[in-house]
Amino acid sequence: MLRISKLADYATGVMSLVARRPEEVHSAAKIAVGLGIGQATASKILKLLAQGGLVKAQRGVKGGYVIARAPERISLAEIIDAIEGIPLGLTECSSTPGMCVQESGCLVRGNWQRISVAIRRALEGVTLADMVLPGQPPAPVAPVTFFKTVGARKAAAATGEGR
């Protein structure tokens, strides 16, 4: 199963919360309470988002964080990149060349890269503004047939069918 990290997931929540009130200065403590996460986690995420240029830190008694640019100009890909520190890729070699010792002779690397590019484009196509739209129904998910196919093959092999 492909998943983004818990920290990247929380970061989309942090950015969504900040984007809903872009004119406000948001403290790590208020964000933590608003999202139901620990303050240390919120602080870590905010620091990474600031390093990624997605939020700006404001010092002082009424300090905190503000969104760095309009939510329409921030993609989910940027948020994930800021948290993960490297571009998103399904395999090590599909996003950063030189990460795998088998890279030069790999027969499937090109296909993994193609799949990673498609996923990246999808994430680049969803903005933070899209994420904060109220009442967005979940996108329909196509049924997964892999397990049915594997199960059918096992059943056919057990009964001697399909030969």
Image (cartoon, helix red, strand yellow):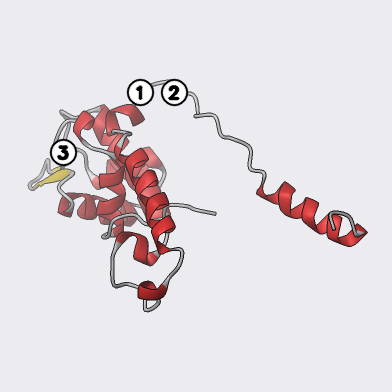
Q: Indicate which disc residue 12 carries.
A: none
Question: Does label 3 or label 1 sit earlier along the sequence?
Answer: 3
Kind of residue at disc 3: Val
Circles 1, 2 touching at the beta carbon (< 8 Å): yes
Name the spot of residue 101 as percent of width and height, x first. Answer: 37, 79
Q: Indicate which disc residue 136 carries.
A: 2
Kind of residue at disc 2: Gln
The quarter of the picture where the C terminus appears is: bottom right
Which mark is in front, 3 or 1? 1
Q: Indicate which disc residue 66 carries.
A: 3
Q: Is residue 146 above or below residue 76?
A: below
Image quadrant where residue 162 sits: bottom right
Q: Is residue 78 above or below residue 95?
A: above
Q: Indicate which disc residue 133 carries.
A: 1
Could you say whether the residue bearing mark 1 is in a helix, strand or loop?
Answer: loop
**Observer-nearest of 112 and 79:** 112
